[in-house]
Every structure is written in C-alpha cells, then in structure tokens.
Image (cartoon, rainbow, N blue to C red):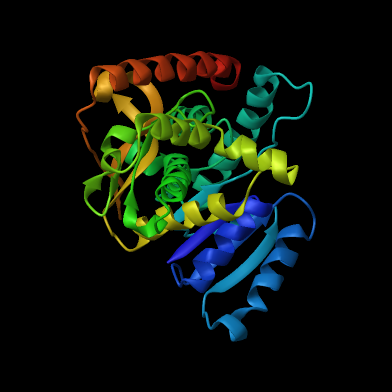
C-alpha cells in the first residue's frame, strides 16, 4: 500500500513518521515545493528504521508528482497558516488555489486514490476538493474530527484523572474554535456516562477547552501543533488501508444528513477501504441540533469565498 503526503512540514512529516513506524503502509512519498525539504525529512525518517524496527520505504521529492503514481491514499497538508493581519478571505483564497492545484496533480497519476484533506480551513478545503475534482463523496475526506475528538478525550481524562484510553468521546461540526461541538452528553468512561463522575460545570469547561485546543497549543508553541494532528491523520489512513471500518468523526459531503445539504462538515463516519463507507446518524438532542445548524451556517459562509476559485 502506498501513501503520498503533499506538504512535508511538521504535520506531514509527523504523519509519515507515524505511518512508517506503525507499518500502516509499505511505501510513503513526501512531496513539497521547497527544494530538498521533503528529501531531507524522508532521509531523517529512514535513518530511524534500524532503531525503531520498521520496513516502510519513505522517499521525498520536490514537486515531482510522477513519483506519487499509484497512491492508494493521498494526504494534502499543503497551504499556509493564517498570519497576523491576514483576513480569513485572504487565507481561503491562497490555500484554495494551492489545494485545488495539488488535487488535480495527484489525480493525474493516481486516478483511483482516496484524498484526505488536512489543509485549513479544513471543511472549506474539503468542499473545494470535492467540487473541483468531481470525485464521488466517499473518496474525499476531511481530517479534523479525529484530532478534535482526541483533544476532547484528553481534556476529559484530565478532568476524570483517568487514562484517556478508557474514555470515549466525539466532536462533530465544523473544525474551528467556534464551530466544533464536543458531545459531552454522549461521552463515557468505560461505558458509563461521564456525567456520573463530572459536574455540568466541569463538562462545560472541558468542552470550552477542547474548542480552543488548537489555539492553546499555538499560544504555547508559537506555531501550530503537529504531533497530535500528524498522528490523527495516520489513524484515519490506517482505517482506510486496513479496511478497519472504524467510526471516526470526519468532514464529508452531506446530502440531507443532519439536516444539511451541499456542505462538508464533521459527522460520525465509518471509514474503510472505500473511504467513507457510511454516515452514522447519532440522535442529537434539540440543543445539539441547534449548535450543528449554527456551525453549518458559519462553514457555509466561508464556502462562499470559493466562488472565484471554482468558477
């Protein structure tokens, strides 16, 4: 199985590293536009092979899409982060052009691939990729919910003072500080609702901390996080390549599900060898439905800025 990761920055390289040492794919290609950058990252990862015991072949290329041919999954992390003074519209305009070009180039060499979108704003870039390529919805998946859910479970485990692997929880909605929806009502600790152990006040704080989880790390690090995002991408790719059919919150195209049309947003999905295999209908309460609708309005407003790119 072959995976291409476009964008050899911190997230892309971490994703390649996790895929390699976990043996998720037999081959990983890192591609970047910066001369020698992907090659250097790939060489560094490969020099871990004997000490960590993996057999995955990792290679790097500079803007040569022919080397990505035959990829089963392509991960798109390329784009720029928002800079001080930059408007949302400027970020969308720049990243939309990059993501559209990347998607078109990878499909020339891997026409049957499944595309995982990581570039921000993620829901909007996922929608752009779907519309620009014309691919069926099962083959375009936005990775955001897996990361948001891992952060949610981290904050729950801290509040519970219990191992995070004993905690279950999911975040749906848009992948943004004000649009994600941590489902505290449905979170559990070894099968028991977390509300049995935590007060509503604490749960509200957990949800609030989750929603600004990325911004918190940016403030601490001075840049975007990469370990958890890279590992979350690898987790999603693993479910695709090994046909694990895990339920993962992903940004996918909705056609009436959760009351929304013509939009990509985070919802519970079954992920397997065909990419998106099923959207799971979790019965939301009235408050959660209202939050989801509000989140959709915000995501849809951002999608409106794609008109010039999709024209």
Percent from the top left, x then y, of residue 102?
Answer: 59, 42
Quadrant of the image occupied by residue 182: top left
Percent from the top left, x then y, of residue 99?
Answer: 59, 36
Identify which residue, 278 or 139, lies in the foreground.
278
Q: Where 84 falls versus 39 (above or below)? A: above
Quadrant of the image occupied by residue 262: top left
Percent from the top left, x then y, of residue 158?
Answer: 47, 49
Direction from residue 298 to residue 37 in the image, left or right = right
Identify which residue, 253 or 284, lies in the foreground.
284
Say which quadrant the N terminus sits in: bottom left
> Which residue sits at x=54%, y=52%?
228
Quadrant of the image occupied by residue 137: top left
Number of labels in the image equals: 0
Q: Where 227 falls versus 224 (above or below)? A: below
Residue 73 is at least partly visible in this image: yes
Residue 183 is at least partly visible in this image: no
> Which residue sits at x=44%, y=42%?
152
Say which quadrant the C terminus sits in: top right
Identify which residue, 49 or 162, lies in the foreground.
162
Q: Residue at the bottom extreme?
A: 50
> Which residue sits at x=47%, y=64%?
2
Q: Where 39 falls versus 224 (above or below)? A: below
> Which residue sits at x=59%, y=39%?
214
Percent from the top left, x then y, of residue 302?
Answer: 54, 18
């Amino acid at each position: 199985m072959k995976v291409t990761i476009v964008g050899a920055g911190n997230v892309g390289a971490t994703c390649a590293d996790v895929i390699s040492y976990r043996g998720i794919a037999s081959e990983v290609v890192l591609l970047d536009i910066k001369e020698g950058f992907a090659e250097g990252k790939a060489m560094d990862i490969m020099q871990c092979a004997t000490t960590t015991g993996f057999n995955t072949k990792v290679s790097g290329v500079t803007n040569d899409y022919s080397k990505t041919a035959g990829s089963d999954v392509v991960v798109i992390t390329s784009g720029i982060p928002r800079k001080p003074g930059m408007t949302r519209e400027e970020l969308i305009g720049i990243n939309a052009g990059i993501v559209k070009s990347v998607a078109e180039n990878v499909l020339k060499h891997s026409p049957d691939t499944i595309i995982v979108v990581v570039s921000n704003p993620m829901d909007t870039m996922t929608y752009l990729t779907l519309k620009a390529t014309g691919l069926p919805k099962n083959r375009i998946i936005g990775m955001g919910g897996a990361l948001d859910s891992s952060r949610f479970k981290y904050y729950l485990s801290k509040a519970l003072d219990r191992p995070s692997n004993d905690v279950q929880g999911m975040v749906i909605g848009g992948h943004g500080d004000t649009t994600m929806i941590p489902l505290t009502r449905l979170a559990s600790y070894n099968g028991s609702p977390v509300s049995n152990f935590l007060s509503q006040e604490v749960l509200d704080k957990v949800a609030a901390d989750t929603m600004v989880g990325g911004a918190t790390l940016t403030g601490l690090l001075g840049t975007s996080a990469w370990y958890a995002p890279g590992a979350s991408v690898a987790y999603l790719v693993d479910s695709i390549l090994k046909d694990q059919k895990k339920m993962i919150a992903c940004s996918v195209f909705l056609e009436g599900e959760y009351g929304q049309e013509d939009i990509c947003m985070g919802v519970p999905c079954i992920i397997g060898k065909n990419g998106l295999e099923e959207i799971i209908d979790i019965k939301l309460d009235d408050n959660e439905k209202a939050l989801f609708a509000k989140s959709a309005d915000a995501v849809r407003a951002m999608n409106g800025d794609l008109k010039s790119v999709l024209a």
